[in-house]
Amino acid sequence: MIYFDNGSTSHPKAPGLPQAVREILERGCFNINRGGYAGAYEMSSLVFDVREKTAAMFGCEDGRQVVFTGSLTQSLNMALKGLLSPGDRVVTTQIEHNAVLRPLAQLQAQGLIVDVARCGSDGRLDLSDLDAKINERTKLVVMSHASNVCGAILPVSQVGQICRARGVLLLVDAAQTAGVLDIDMTYIDALAFPCHKGLLASQGLGGFIVKSDLAEKIEPVIMGGTGSLSHEITQPGFLPDKFESGTMNIPAIMGLKKSLEYIKSVGVKTIFEKEIKLTESFVSEISKIDDVSIVGKKDMIDRAAVVSLDFKNRDNAEIAAALDGNYGIMTRCGLHCAPNAHKTLGTYPHGTVRFSFGHFNTTDEIEYIVASIKEILKKDASGF
C-alpha cells in the first residue's frame, strides 16, 4: 500500500512515537495539576517541556502561550467564538477549509459580518482585494496558510503587516504547513495547528499559539476543572489554563514530544525540500498526460506538497477507486471539506483527486503512481 493522503493525516508517524505513547501509559499517565504526588508533578513538568518545544517550533518564546486542544478545528472554534460578537466584521479568503467556514457561518447567522477576499484560479490571494475589504469595523482576518486543495501558499507575513498597519488581528490556520514550513509569528496573533499532519504525531491533539494581549480578549467557550484556582467557580484568566479545561490527552502530548524531537533532528527545511522535490517530479510527469488537468499552480513557487488532479474524460471517483483497488494507492477524492476553494478553482461540484506527499514518500512511489495513472487511462470504463 502506498499512501498519498498526508494532507488528511500523516503516515507513517514519527519514528518512536508508538513506543513513547505506550511507555507513558505503562509507566503512569497521571493528570497534571490534579495530584499532590511525585508522579503528577513529573507529568506537569513533562507536559510543560512539550509546550516549550512546540513554542520553539513556531518561533514563540513563551511555552505558556501554547494551548493544547483536541484538534485544529477545535482551536479555530475556540478562538473565533471566544473573540467575535454580533456586529463585528471578519475578513477571510475564497479558499478556506470548512474548519474556518462553518464557525464563521454559524456566527454570521448571529450577526457577524464576513467579507471574503478574492483568490485567483491558481489559488493565489489577491492582497489588494484583502486590503480593500478591511475597514474600521474589521476585527479579525482569519486565513489558511496553504490551500488543502491545490497547495497554494498564502502570503501570511504580508497579510500580517497589512493587519498590523490597520489595527486588525490575524488568526492563521496552519493545517497544511505546521511542521513543514518555517512559520514566523511576528505578525501573527494566533496560530492554530494540528498535531497529526506535518507534525507527524497522533490524531486527537491540536492546539493554538496565542499572544498574551489577544488571549485577554478571547473568552473561554469551554469551562471547567483546570487543577488551578480550584477554590473559585470562575475560570482562571491566565495561560494556558484559561483554555484548557478538563483532562488533557497526555499520551498524545508525549507522542508529540517524540515527533517534535524527530523533526528538529531532520530539520523543517530539509523536510520541505524533500516534499517539494517529490511534488515537482509528480507535476512534471503528470503535465505530459493530455487527459489530466493539474488544478491551480503548475510551478513550485509558494506551494505546499498538495496536488489536485481533474481527469477530463473520466469520473474522478472511478480513478481514485481504481488507484486504491487495483494499485494499492491511497488518495483522497471529492471536495476535501473546502467547497468554496473548489468553486474558486473551477472544480465544483465534482471535486478532484488529491495527492498530498509527505516526508516518508519516495521517488520510486512517484514513478509508480504516474505509471499507474497512465495505465488506468489506457483502459476504457469496462476496465474498472
Image: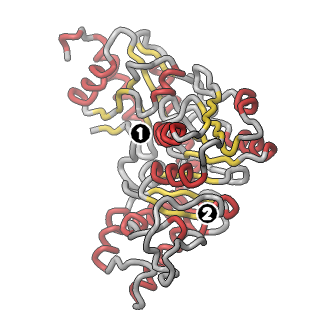
- Name which residue lies at 49% across and 59% down: 221
Secondary structure category for the residue under label 2? helix
From the viewer's perspective, tell me whether residue 29 is left or right of residue 110.
Answer: left
Work out how far the residue at label 2 is from the one at label 1, CA to CA, in angstroms: 29 Å
Badge 1, how many Cα within 10 Å: few under 14, some, many 20+? some
Amino acid found under the numbered disc labelled 1: Thr
Badge number at residue 268: none
Residue 252: name its quadrant: bottom left
Out of 357 and 122, give the one closest to the viewer: 122
Q: Residue furthest right?
A: 165
Question: Percent x, y for residue 166?
Answer: 79, 43
Q: Earlier in the sequence, mark 2 or mark 1?
A: 2
Residue 305 visible at all: no
Badge number at residue 56: 2
Which quadrant of the rendered structure holds the C terminus? top left
Question: Percent x, y for residue 272?
Answer: 55, 44
| Image position of 4 with respect to 78: above or below | above
Which quadrant of the rendered structure holds the N terminus? top left
Residue 316 visible at all: yes
What colouring style does the render use?
secondary structure
| Residue under label 1 | 362
